[in-house]
Image (cartoon, rainbow, N blue to C red):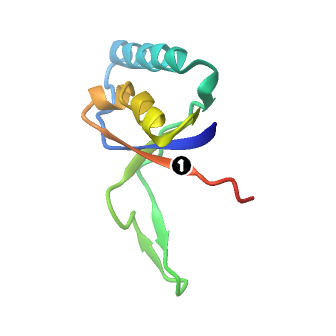
């Protein structure tokens, strides 16, 4: 088993309390399907970001698309982690998921 980060980009925020409750329920249901493989349900990211360059310079924002949140799962392979990502509620909101294996070097 290895750990993978599911990195979210985009997606629409729920506007009303009713929509927020529906979205939270969808995440809870999805987390339930992951079961013991769910290591960290994650959180959304705020809208502000800064990027620090190798020369120490600081720029406003992300260098590419703004990431919107993350989840960490344990899975047998990148393929099975990607299958888990296919159920993410962020996809229903128009977002996307990038799956990275976390290399345990520290």
Whether residue 64 sits left or right of residue 37 in the image: it is left
Residue at 35% across, 31% down: 90
| Secondary structure beneath label 1 | strand
Residue 33: percent from the left, percent from the top? 50, 16
Provide the residue designation for mark 1. Answer: 101
Locate the C terminus by quadrant. bottom right
Q: How many marks?
A: 1
Residue 12: percent from the left, percent from the top? 29, 34
Residue 19: percent from the left, percent from the top? 33, 17
Residue 16 vs residue 57, the one in the foreground: 57
Residue 106 vs residue 90, the one in the foreground: 106
Q: Quadrant of residue 97?
A: top left
User: Residue lying furthest left in this view?
Assistant: 94
Residue at 52% across, 44% down: 5
106 in relation to 21, above or below: below
Residue at 33% across, 19% down: 16
Residue at 40% across, 30% down: 83
Q: Quadrant of residue 14?
A: top left
């Amino acid at each position: 088993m290895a750990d993978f980060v599911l990195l979210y980009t985009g997606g629409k925020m729920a506007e009303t309390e009713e929509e927020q409750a529906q979205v939270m329920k969808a995440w809870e249901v999805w987390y339930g399907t992951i079961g013991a493989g769910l290591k960290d349900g994650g959180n959304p990211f705020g809208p502000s970001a800064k990027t620090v360059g190798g020369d120490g310079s600081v720029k406003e924002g992300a260098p590419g698309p703004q990431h919107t949140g993350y989840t960490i799962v344990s899975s047998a392979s990148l393929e099975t982690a990607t299958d888990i990502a296919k159920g993410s509620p962020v996809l229903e909101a128009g977002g996307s998921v990038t799956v990275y294996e976390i290399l345990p070097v520290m």
